[in-house]
Image (cartoon, helix red, strand yellow):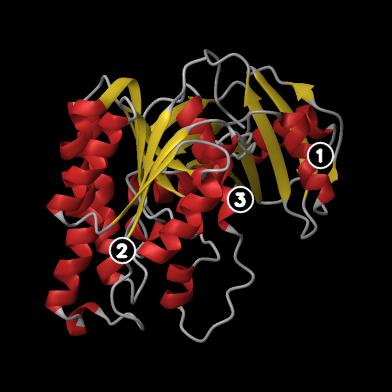
Amino acid sequence: MTIKTALVTGASRGLGLALARELAGTGWQLIINARGADALETARSELSKHTTVIAVAGDVADAAHRHELRAAAERLGGLDAIVNNASILGPSPQPNLLDYPLDALEEVYRVNVIAPLALLQAVRSTFKDDARIINVSSDAGVEAYPGWGGYGSSKAAFEQLSAILAAENPTLRVYWVDPGDMQTQMHQKAFPGEDISDRPLPETSVPGFIELLNGSLPGGRYQARKIGQPEPDHAKSLIVSLTVPNFDQALAVYRDGLHLPVRQEWHEIGHGVLLDAGRALIEILDETQAVHVDQIEAGRRVSGQIRLAFEVQDVGKTAASLQQNGAVTINDPVMTEWGHYNQRMQSPDNMQITLFKIVNDETLERA
């Protein structure tokens, strides 16, 4: 059995230590780093009961320390993975950007952005085949949270750095990973005086990291706690279906007044048109066409002026989910003449809802 080796920075506590524990328990050799020598030695003493561990105390922003980490990697025969986990929050409480001390901001960028890249440059000669690079990011790197300008913008830069690194090195697996909110010292520092006991422990994010280290997922951005979880059966598109008393007048308002392009039009039984409204579609039906649709989907005339139609992956599964949340079924699912598998529902507020899956995409998309 081939023994794997990982370098994990910021491994004396929090996520870094939780991940190191899991790796040690499965036989990975470890090189661990942290600035606090005492805490790092405590972690080394614990982990070394299970595997070979080299602990190197120091700051990843220091070039001499990075050379020490490279020497440790060479001593253990090279790296199968590096986890750039070490980072700093900056001032606490966190100041708004217009009040942010620039020397402190410079330090945040030096530790959170420049140091991880410098470490990769220092140890890249030790990478084995199929080496994995995991750069620990944050949702603050993609969301604009007031008061998180220093840390958040540094993580945004780290995310873009990771993406470009991946594009430039297609033979490496480069991951940038959001572990989610956690009960950590850094998170407590971000919310001084607040109770953060409702946040998950770092251990809840570890399985996602292990999957990236051991599995075959392609490089890219991931949320640790969603890795390996089934994708929710969310709606893929929305059609707002309007039944109008004066079809031509409504068409003039929506098509001509809003300049919405016509996606499709039909007039075999009544008149209907599908307008592209950007992120959704607007369907306009005259009464005859609305009666026809209701007869097919519900067996009788039940819709009001507005009906919502959602394209979903699994009609039955989504219908069951809606029922659990208060909706009722109008009738059994049907295969429509326009190539959809449809289920008519009614929400607690009496809104008519059509769930549909396109079975034959060469037919009309009407809902």
Q: Say what amino acid the circle numbered 1 marks.
A: Ala
Q: Residue at x 32, y 80 (%)?
A: 94
Q: Mark 1 points at which residue?
A: 320
- The answer to whether one can see residue 164 in this image is no
Circle nearer the viewer, 1 or 2: 2
For numbered disc 3, what is the local secondary structure? Answer: helix
Q: How far apart are marks 1 and 3 (CA)?
A: 29 Å
For numbered disc 1, what is the local secondary structure? Answer: helix
Q: Is residue 36 left or right of residue 165?
A: right
The quadrant in which residue 152 appears is bottom left
Q: Do the residues labelled 1 and 3 touch (CB within 8 Å)?
A: no
Q: Earlier in the sequence, mark 3 or mark 2?
A: 2
Q: Where is residue 112 drawn, in percent x and y? A: 25, 57
Q: Say what amino acid the circle numbered 2 marks.
A: Gly
Circle nearer the viewer, 1 or 3: 3
Q: In this picture, is 264 found above or below 309?
A: above
Q: Where is residue 188 drawn, in percent x and y? A: 48, 75
Q: Name the residue under label 3.
A: 204
The quadrant in which residue 99 appears is bottom left
Q: Residue at x 66, y 51 (%)?
A: 305
What label sits on residue 152 in the rendered view?
2
Q: In this picture, is 41 found above or below 207?
A: below
Q: Where is residue 252 drawn, in percent x and y? A: 40, 46
